[in-house]
Image: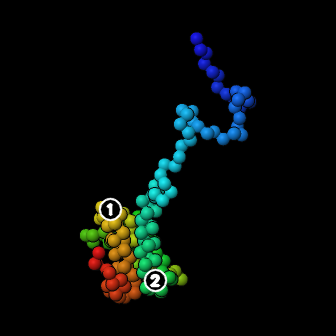
Amino acid sequence: MNSPVPPRGPDDPGRPGDSDQAPRRRDRHGRGMRGPVAPPQVPLAVSRSEAFDDLVRDSVSRLERRWPQLAGVEFAVQEVPRSDNGELDEQAEAVPLGRVAESKSGRPDRIVVYRRPVEIRTRNRDERALLVHEVVVEQVAELLGLSPESVDPRYGQD
């Protein structure tokens, strides 16, 4: 009959063949060490909010090439519009997808894109990227006092 092996304590040096310095080449089942879950180019560790931030960043960088004055504009992503500070109009039927906050008291102009309303209106990443770009173009057009088509000639064509 086999007797159970007592657990190792902090002062127990272990079995004579154990060595803490040598790296293990195999796991306890003899299959080898585990490799990466996915290749490095696959964005498994990117959260939905980080992916959304990337979409906004891409859209802004496309527009900044054509409109250098946007370098002084602050772009932000917010989950949802808040009703306590006037971002959300209680009487409006639709929830806004973005807004422009013009500069005041030393703060730069700011364009905010609301993540959850945009995500709810899209089914996949491609649709989301198109809608994010349209929202950013619309807000930039409002800030500059131009039409969205003059801000981005491809607006509404995709």
Q: Give the structural element (helix, strand or loop) at label 1.
A: loop
Give the position of the N terminus as an image quadrant.
Answer: top right
Residue beneath disc 2: 65
Residue beneath disc 1: 124
Q: Residue 91: in sight, yes or no?
A: no
* Number of other residues with Cα within 10 Å of mark 2, as a class: few under 14, some 14 to 19, many 20 or more: few
Total marks in image: 2
Residue at image x 45%, y 67%? 53
Q: Are marks 1 and 2 in contact (CB under 8 Å)?
A: no
Res. 148 image quadrant: bottom left
The scheme the figure's colours follow is: rainbow
| Image position, residue 74 (x, y; %) | 48, 77
Residue at image x 46%, y 57%? 42
| Image position, residue 84 (x, y; %) | 39, 68
Give the position of the C terminus as an image quadrant.
Answer: bottom left
| Image position, residue 16 (x, y; %) | 72, 27
Q: Amino acid at mark 1?
A: Asn
Earlier sequence position, callout 1 versus callout 2: 2
Question: Which one is nearer the viewer's eye here, 141 or 86?
Answer: 141
Q: Residue 147: in sight, yes or no?
A: yes
Residue at image x 59%, y 37%? 26
Question: Which one is nearer the viewer's eye here, 136 or 125?
Answer: 125
| Image position, residue 147 (x, y; %) | 32, 86
How many angstroms separate mark 1 from mark 2 (CA)?
A: 27 Å
Q: Amino acid at mark 2?
A: Arg
